[in-house]
């Protein structure tokens, strides 16, 4: 869905334009995709919820096939937090602490919120407001772009505090923001606040009246997008989503069979009861594939199946591995059976390193865009990636090299797993040389 400045200018009125734009957005495939991704993030698989049907019998009866308990895996929630934490577990750093202070007290928390939202929805938004970054969720903001260049020149933000509460709408333009309220969706929009500059000076009287005495607007719209990847797509790709669906469905099938039938099926042959009841039993058995039709002697015989535990586990493990591989994320399961933990960790994290570099670039672009609006300068925007380390084997190797007389600087320089901890480990080894290793391993 693309909304342009031309659409806004040709509308009968701004309230009409805003209401139509929001309604179109709420009915768009992109909005539906975002809402679906949010459900997967929160562990609610929508396919699992709508998968179960009821069988209508020829006799007019209905068989309800819903399981007693759906089993949800929450893979996408785990993946989102793992990858955002991979890059943003440690704070983003600038040239100095003074620069960081200029980015606002909520900077680190807002960056993490926006990054998680971008991973889920393909993008998210940050609004530079009164010397802080404010997160605007992807599904609550509609960009308005130039008809020719596609540059974002305005945007509509809408929200509701809770169900049955009034709706709020804001139109962001380069020279200020206008706010409307709506008692209920579909009702008339009432202007609450006229266009207000983003930065201004005001005079307050004792009676509470205020007047703007000076305007200090930004040179551009103070809202910037953060994308999850260079392709500007959600990380809930089709290969990942279909495998999550398969995982949840198979787990639910298995658990429901165990809870309800305990892997017992029935051989039914003949029945001397009510004819209507007999037909229901026969039709149910045929539709579920339990027995074939035919005339037999009157008999109902339970048969027990051995639960296919090993086969089930292998399928589930295979799906889990494929989900993490498609997501290019490291899974601790990859360490199972490895003779060298350090090598397995390094190999397992390599795809994640590649992906993290792309995401790092997108976050840096966002941060620099906000810095430009805020008038903050910094040569470096530095990310310290969180990495898993086999610290026990690393410690033994470092101590051995140190005891052989290898200079500390050389040890750390050629240990790729320690690039983010050079100063920490150098200090620890130095303390070991002074006899400060008592009471535990200083490097752990």
Image: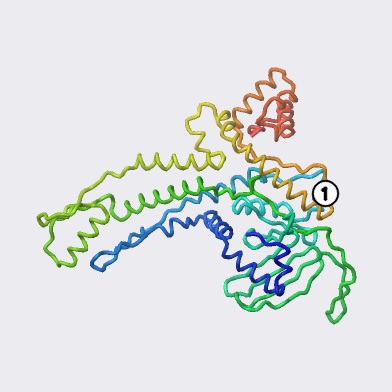
Question: Which residue occupies the extreme left position in the image?
Answer: 297
Choose top left, top right, bottom left or bottom right for residue 300.
Answer: bottom left
Name the residue that disc number 1 marks.
Answer: 99
The picture places residue 354, in percent across and down from the top left corner, at 63, 37
Question: Which residue occupies the extreme bottom position in the image?
Answer: 207
In the rendered image, the vertical position of residue 357 relative to residue 286, given as above or below: above
- The way the protein has been coloured in the rendering is rainbow
Q: Residue at x 27, y 55 (%)?
A: 288
User: How dense is the environment of label 1, judged by Cα within 10 Å: few (below 14), some, or many (20 and up)?
Assistant: some
Along the horizontal axis of the image, is 268 left or right of 233? left
**How many marks on residues?**
1
The picture places residue 143, in percent across and down from the top left corner, at 69, 60
Q: Residue at x 24, y 65 (%)?
A: 58
Label 1 secondary element = helix
Along the horizontal axis of the image, is 67 left or right of 301? right
Quadrant containing the N terminus is bottom right
The picture places residue 376, in percent across and down from the top left corner, at 83, 51
Q: Residue at x 23, y 47 (%)?
A: 304
Choose top left, top right, bottom left or bottom right for residue 66.
Answer: bottom left
Pick the front one: 170 or 439: 170
Quadrant containing the C terminus is top right
Pick the front one: 373 or 400: 373
Q: Residue at x 82, y 55 (%)?
A: 374
Along the horizontal axis of the image, is 50 left or right of 261? right
The picture places residue 351, in percent across and down from the top left corner, at 59, 36
Choose top left, top right, bottom left or bottom right for residue 152.
Answer: bottom right
């Amino acid at each position: 869905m693309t909304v342009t400045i031309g659409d806004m200018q040709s509308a009968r009125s701004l309230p009409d334009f805003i209401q139509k734009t929001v309604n179109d957005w709420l009915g768009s495939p992109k909005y539906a995709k975002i809402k679906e991704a949010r459900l997967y993030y929160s562990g609610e698989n929508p396919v699992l919820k709508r998968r179960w049907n009821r069988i209508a019998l020829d006799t007019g009866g209905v068989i309800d096939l819903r399981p007693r308990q759906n089993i949800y895996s929450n893979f996408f929630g785990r993946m989102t937090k793992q990858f955002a934490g991979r890059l943003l577990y440690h704070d983003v750093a600038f040239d100095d602490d003074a620069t960081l202070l200029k980015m606002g007290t909520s900077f680190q928390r807002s960056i993490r919120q926006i990054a998680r939202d971008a991973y889920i929805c393909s993008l998210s938004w940050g609004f530079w407001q009164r010397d802080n970054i404010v997160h605007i969720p992807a599904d609550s903001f509609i960009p308005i772009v130039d008809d020719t260049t596609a540059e974002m020149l305005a945007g509509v933000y809408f929200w509701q505090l809770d169900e049955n509460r009034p709706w709020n709408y804001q139109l962001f333009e380069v020279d200020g923001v206008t706010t409307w309220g709506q008692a209920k969706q579909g009702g008339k929009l009432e202007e609450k606040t006229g266009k207000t500059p983003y930065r201004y000076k005001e005079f307050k009287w004792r009676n509470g009246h205020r007047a703007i005495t000076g305007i200090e607007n930004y040179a551009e719209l103070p809202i910037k997008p953060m994308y999850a990847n260079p392709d500007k797509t959600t990380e809930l790709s089709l290969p990942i989503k279909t495998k999550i669906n398969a995982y949840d469905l198979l787990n639910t099938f298995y658990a429901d069979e165990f809870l309800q039938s305990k892997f017992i099926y029935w051989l039914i042959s003949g029945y001397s009861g009510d004819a209507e009841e007999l037909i229901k039993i026969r039709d149910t058995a045929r539709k579920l594939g339990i027995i074939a039709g035919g005339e037999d002697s009157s008999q109902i015989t339970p048969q027990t199946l051995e639960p296919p535990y090993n086969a089930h586990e292998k399928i589930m493990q295979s799906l889990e591995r494929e989900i993490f591989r498609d997501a290019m994320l490291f899974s601790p399961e990859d360490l199972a059976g490895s003779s060298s933990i350090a090598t397995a960790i390094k190999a397992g994290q390599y795809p994640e390193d590649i992906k993290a570099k792309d995401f790092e670039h997108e976050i840096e672009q966002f941060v620099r865009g906000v810095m430009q609006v805020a008038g903050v300068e910094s040569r470096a925007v530095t990310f310290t990636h969180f990495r898993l380390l086999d610290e026990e084997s690393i410690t033994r190797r470092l101590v051995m090299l140190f005891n052989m007389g290898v200079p500390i600087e050389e040890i750390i320089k050629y240990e790729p797993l320690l690039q983010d901890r050079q100063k920490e480990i150098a200090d620890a080894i130095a303390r070991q040389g002074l006899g400060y290793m008592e009471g535990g391993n200083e490097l752990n």
